[in-house]
């Protein structure tokens, strides 16, 4: 079930009413969350429910076994390894089987001239499998590392894994944050619910008005990049940069706001990343739930930053190669990850200060020249990375960059997507003014826009009108494929 669908707009109020007024009490609410979440997820294909149930059962059972054999470390290691193997095997089969068999076949042909029999399977990729798999793994790893006790309530654990607002595209919640909320009594908070609705509204604006309009232009022109001058090719990359941000962060805003309607607080997943002053800062602000997952469960165990510089760089490349592969079964994603690993290594080698303590232009309306140059460079490098990410193959990526270098620089008749560029710039302006807030529609109680009810309603209806008038053709969320 898509957030931007009629089914969801019918589903959400029904679930909200039943959750607060029929299924009263923590245990009944948790059970209802599981039912509603399975309906939400099974709307795509009921067979997907089998996989998420297996993942939930495996991780729940491993937690109980880890607690039972607390004094037997070797048994705990075997249990933890077994659960990780089960979950990653499911993920590998459904997401990477064809990718690795095709890659192996290409390698054998190029090296030995040997052609394998066709073993490609017609596998349907379950929506959001990477997200809920990593969420389940974080629980069992945290129990193994004694960061939290194992839960004995299967219902609350299934609710934690399948919680529908963030099930298919994050944030990837840690059990240490979300699971205790299922274990606690929840009371309706009007102020929290209203702010959640505002965040959802902002998410829908980003998705429907900016991301979907940009997607139409990008999809139309991407396969005709040979025809465009260099400037238009770069602008095409910028449009995809706006598209993927508004699409993914829009989903996160909707998910976080929706969760607040039910009394849950999810982690912030985007923190205005396009205002970053360096690539390392960008990755502390983009898809925060995933980057911190890789940091805590892969980067730190490898030694993190507390080792020799060459080992730090090695760790960065390992993490980013895995991160690229997590995003999809295509070498473009791996190369995109290695591209950012290379940038991070350069920052590390030259010991550039990237650990900014404050938001950019803290206490000021405008950035200074140094900050502006830093933001511009970071944005430019990010656009280059997103072009690799969007390409269908590395051959296409290289040809795209070759066209950027060789085609004529400017042709006024070939400028594309000016409406989308304008919308993107307006978005950045609004987010710049609200960059110290959790989301762009978060206002203090004394803010002029919230002082009078008519002004509040006028703002909300104006945004809804914009979503209706300027909405692009409906597009699925980009990160559903991951």
Image (spheres, rainbow, N blue to C red):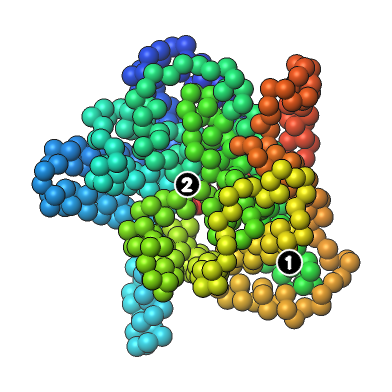
Mark 1 = which residue? Answer: 234
Sooner in the amino-acid sequence: mark 2 or mark 1: 1
Q: Residue at x 37, y 22 (%)?
A: 184
Gap in Å between the C-alphas at discs 2 and 1?
A: 29 Å
Image check: 357 left or right of 125? right
Task: Residue 159: give x, y in percent of width and height.
Answer: 37, 31
List x then y, in percent, for residue 352.
57, 66
Vertical order, 420 against 409 (above or below):
above
Q: Nearer the viewer, mark 2 or mark 1?
A: 2
**Does residue 410 appear anywhere in the picture?**
yes
> Few, some or many C-alpha atoms within 10 Å of disc 2 (few <14, some 14-19, many ≥20)?
many
Given residues 236 and 299, the one toward you in this image is 299
Q: Position of residue 54 (x, y in %)?
A: 28, 42
Secondary structure beneath disc 2? helix
User: Would you say the residues marked 2 and 1 are in contact, meaning their CB atoms lie under 8 Å apart?
Assistant: no
The correct choice, above or below, for 42 with respect to 426 in the image is: above
């Amino acid at each position: 079930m898509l957030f931007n669908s009629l089914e969801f707009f019918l589903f959400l109020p029904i679930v909200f009413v039943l959750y607060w007024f029929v299924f009263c009490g923590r245990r009944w609410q948790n059970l209802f969350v599981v039912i509603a979440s399975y309906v939400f997820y099974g709307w795509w294909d009921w067979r997907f429910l089998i996989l998420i149930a297996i993942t939930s059962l495996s991780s729940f059972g491993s937690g109980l076994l880890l607690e039972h054999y607390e004094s037997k470390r070797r048994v705990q290691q075997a249990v933890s390894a077994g659960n990780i193997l089960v979950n990653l095997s499911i993920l590998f089969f459904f997401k990477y089987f064809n990718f690795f068999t095709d890659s192996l076949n290409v390698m054998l042909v190029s090296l030995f001239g040997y052609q394998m029999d066709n073993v490609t399977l017609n596998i349907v990729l379950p929506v959001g499998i990477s997200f809920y798999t990593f969420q389940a793994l974080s629980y069992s790893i945290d129990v193994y590392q004694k960061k939290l006790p194992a839960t004995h309530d299967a219902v609350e654990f299934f609710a934690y894994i399948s919680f529908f607002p963030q099930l298919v595209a994050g944030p990837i919640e840690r059990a240490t944050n979300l699971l205790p909320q299922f274990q606690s009594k929840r009371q309706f908070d009007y102020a929290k619910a209203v702010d959640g609705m505002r965040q959802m509204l902002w998410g829908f604006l980003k998705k429907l008005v900016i991301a979907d309009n940009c997607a139409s232009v990008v999809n139309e022109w991407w396969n005709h990049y040979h025809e465009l001058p260099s400037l238009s090719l770069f602008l095409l990359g910028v449009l995809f940069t706006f598209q993927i941000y508004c699409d993914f962060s829009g989903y996160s805003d909707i998910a976080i706001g929706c969760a607040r309607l039910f009394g849950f607080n999810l982690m912030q997943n985007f923190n205005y990343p396009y205002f970053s002053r360096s690539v390392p800062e960008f990755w502390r602000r983009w898809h925060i739930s995933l980057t911190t997952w890789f940091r805590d469960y892969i980067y730190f165990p490898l030694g993190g930053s507390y080792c020799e510089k060459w080992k730090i760089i090695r760790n960065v490349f390992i993490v980013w190669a895995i991160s690229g592969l997590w995003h999809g079964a295509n070498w473009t994603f791996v190369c995109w990850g290695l591209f950012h690993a290379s940038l991070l290594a350069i920052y590390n080698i030259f010991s550039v200060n990237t650990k900014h303590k404050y938001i950019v232009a803290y206490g000021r309306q405008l950035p200074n020249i140094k900050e502006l140059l830093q933001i511009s460079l970071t944005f430019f490098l990010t656009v280059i990375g997103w072009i690799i990410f969007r390409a269908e193959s590395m051959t296409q990526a290289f040809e795209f960059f070759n066209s950027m270098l060789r085609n004529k620089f400017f042709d006024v008749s070939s400028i594309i997507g000016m409406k989308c560029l304008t919308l993107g710039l307006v978005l950045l302006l609004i987010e710049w003014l609200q960059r110290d807030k959790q989301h762009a529609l978060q206002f203090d109680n004394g803010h002029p826009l919230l002082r009078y009810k008519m002004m509040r309603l006028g703002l909300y209806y104006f945004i809804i009108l914009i979503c209706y008038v300027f909405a692009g053709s409906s597009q699925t969320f980009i990160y559903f494929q991951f």
